[in-house]
Amino acid sequence: MIGDVTETATRGASGARLWTPLAISILGFIGLGISSYLTYTSLTGVVPACLPASDCGAVLASPYARALGVPVSLFGIVLYAVLTGLGLSLLQERKKGRALVALGVYAGALAGTLYSAYLTYAQVFEIHGLCIWCLASAIVVAAILALSLIILLSGPSAS
Amino acid sequence: MRSPKLVVGARTFAAATTLAVALVALLIVVGRVGLPEIRTSPALPTHRTFKGSPDAPITIVEYSDFLCHFCQLFATTTGKELERAYIETGKVRLEYRHFPIFGAESVWAALASECAADQGRFWPYHDRLMAAATGSQPGDLTVDKLKGLARETGLDMEAFTACLDSRKYMEKVIRDYEAGKEAGVRATPTFFINGQRVAGAQPYEAFQSLIEVLLGKPGQ
């Protein structure tokens, strides 16, 4: 009984408790879909579906689409899988380690956002073509970064 | 509401931030090492898709796809300016090579342009095709449409149709593509100005400054 009350109180004390991890998980899942699709097109040589004005084919055929010999979208799959997993684990009401998990989301999403920014720069200034899937992924990972900051800044200091 | 406070220690937060930034920096640096540097284009055979004097001191090799937006942009703007300033004046010779990246439609367009070249009309057909492809939706550039453009260009339709239907120049198109890949072409359009790689539909000024530099250094 007392446990239940405490739990409810904790949940109420911070509105960010439930919806932020849920949003992170959903966004992570969307990102997973985008990067899986791009990896599939890259490995099979299929030109991805694209808006008429953008140049997905050119962008994804450019050297920026690969790093360390693999399509960069493969890193995307790994990153989004980790972020989704961490988001789901944040949904549980475990107190212990929660801050560290949120910090993991933050670090991963920060890395993703920075790399996406670099790729967007390359699209605009070096490839001169835009890939709508890549931009969508950049927005998703930046949103996850923002959500992780909400969690990290949401509470009284961990003690 | 309380002022926002970190749920982790400031040092831990800073460490995580540094780690993420360092990781990305490393990935970018390592990734750039793999980027193709300026490379020399393969030895230049004389063929039907060039324009300009064969004795021009500068040769621009263009790897292009009729369906690529920036190739269309180049063909209708910067390419025309270059033509007036350098090609017609005998300073530059431009050679078109196929780098089809948008699937079957790109390949058919490339084949059709080669069939026009059979009749010595590559460039008029090229210009018409680039203009027609501008703003087109995927699937618009059908084989019938390619034939219609040939008719508008005033080509001998019997010869053109036989050439296109038999995919006469498939091997040539594939050879261009392979040569492009070999030379480091990863996106269209890509240019080699006397072997120096220029990627993307750069503004006219970018071509101009490089050409002027090269003109100042004969034998380069």
Image (cartoon, coloured by chain):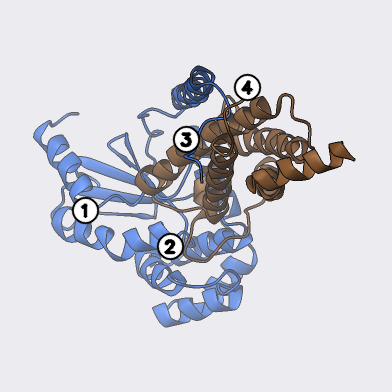
Chain colours: A brown, B blue
Nearest the eye: B161 or B195: B195
Q: Which dot marks residue B204? A: 1
What is the C-alpha distance between the residues marked 2 and 3?
47 Å
The x and y percentages for residue B21 are 47, 25
What is the C-alpha distance between the residues marked 1 and 3?
32 Å
Provide the secondary structure element on which disc 3 rests.
helix
Name the residue beneath numbered marker 3: A114
Q: Are marks 4 and 1 on the same chain?
A: no
In the image: residue A12, left or right of residue B11: right
Name the residue beneath numbered marker 2: B117
Q: Nearer the viewer, mark 3 or mark 4?
A: 4
Provide the secondary structure element on which disc 1 rests.
helix
What is the C-alpha distance between the residues marked 4 and 1?
62 Å
Q: Nearer the viewer, mark 4 or mark 1?
A: 4
- Contact check, label 1 and label 3, Cβ < 8 Å: no
Answer few, some or many: residues within 10 Å of disc 4's Cα (few below 14, many 20 plus, some between 14 and 19). few
The x and y percentages for residue B173 are 54, 51
Mark 2 falls within which chain? B
Q: Amino acid at mark 4?
A: Ser
Q: Going from the N terminus, do you reach mark 1 or mark 2 first?
A: 2
Answer few, some or many: residues within 10 Å of disc 3's Cα (few below 14, many 20 plus, some between 14 and 19). some
Q: Amino acid at mark 3?
A: Leu
What is the C-alpha distance between the residues marked 3 and 4?
31 Å
On screen, residue B30 above or below B216: above
Q: Is residue B100 among what the camera can see?
A: no
Q: Nearer the viewer, mark 4 or mark 2?
A: 4
Q: Amino acid at mark 1?
A: Tyr
Q: Quadrant of residue B166?
A: bottom right
Name the residue beneath numbered marker 4: A159
Q: Quadrant of residue B212?
A: top left
Mark 4 falls within which chain? A
What is the C-alpha distance between the residues marked 1 and 2?
27 Å
